[in-house]
Amino acid sequence: MVVAVDGPVGSGKSSICKLVAKELGFVYLDSGAMYRASAYILQHLNLHIDNLSSALEKTVFTFSDNGGRLSVFIDGKRVDVTNRIRTPEISEITSSLVAKNSAVREILVAKQQEVARMSETEGVSLIADGRDMGTKVFPDAQCKIYLDASPEVRAQRRLKDYQRQGLNITFEQVLTDLVSRDHGDTTRVDSPLVVANGAVVLDTSDMTLEESIQTMVDIITSK
Ligand code: DC
């Protein structure tokens, strides 16, 4: 089974999907981490955006569960980019350059579909989150969910993430950044964020993490 989860920044996708995957014994694919790691490569190698897709063809992304936390590596296991891809600067490069680039999207979509093929071969179900999981990457997914929450709630959640990382940033800065990224995600020409056909919309504004996880598990098991 493939569960495709989409939603805007801070809707709780990663936190919820990771724990749902653990509870149901599914593989978890964080597609946003691939876009972020690609932005890291762009910045780190000082590449022009037009040269990123060919660099990505040779890149191997690896995810591993590190005591409940998802570690992200590039080039097999050699470079751990887990923390480096979660900064406001990488978020900005990802949304303003990387996620808009069709050649990059094509390569990352193929890599995401490959993860699904490998899971299927192993007989394990997959839960994948991002912006185009239900519309583009897995249009035939048996279960599609669109996670949402108000901008203020999402900004508050993102602020807590940044504070946990020791970053000095205000609520207003996070909210402004989030509104601008929402705009970028929903208006880009290639694979904009929309509610996929047949998706269940789940608004988590007034839900705790535990309630969101339980609701999602109920939706998935009902399919
Ligand atoms: O989910 P996230 O915040 O980690 O995503 C980072 C960026 O990547 C965000 O700007 C949206 C983009 N993204 C995308 O365009 N398509 C996806 N499938 C996943 C993320």
Image (cartoon, grey):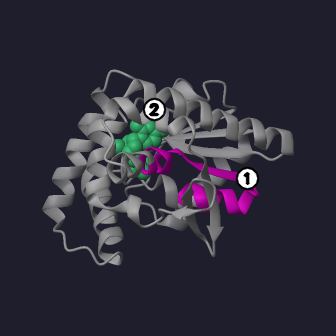
Q: Which amino acid is tagged 1? A: Phe
Q: Tell me where residue 77 appears, x and y as whole percent.
A: 62, 61
Few, some or many C-alpha atoms within 10 Å of disc 1 (few <14, some 14-19, many ≥20)? many
Residue found 24% across the figure and 36% down from its top: 183
Residue found 27% across the figure and 58% down from its top: 88
Q: Are marks 2 and 1 in contact (CB under 8 Å)?
A: no
Query: What span is in magenta?
Result: 16-37
Q: Is residue 1 visible?
A: yes
Q: Quadrant of ligand 1?
A: top left
Residue 35 or residue 149, whichever sits in front: 35
Q: Quadrant of residue 162?
A: bottom left
- Please say if 82 is above or below 49: below
Residue 137 or residue 221, whichever sits in front: 137
Q: Is residue 8 visible?
A: no
Residue placed under numbered mark 2 in the picture:
53
| Side of 87 where 132 appears, left or right | right
Residue found 62% across the figure and 29% down from its top: 138
Residue 147 or residue 97, whichever sits in front: 97
Q: Helix or strand or loop: what does disc 2 sit on?
A: helix
Most common secondary structure along the magenta stretch: helix
Q: Which amino acid is tagged 2? A: Ser
Question: Residue 26: which disc?
Answer: 1
Q: Helix or strand or loop: what does disc 1 sit on?
A: loop
Q: Tell me where residue 195 appears, x and y as whole percent.
A: 45, 30
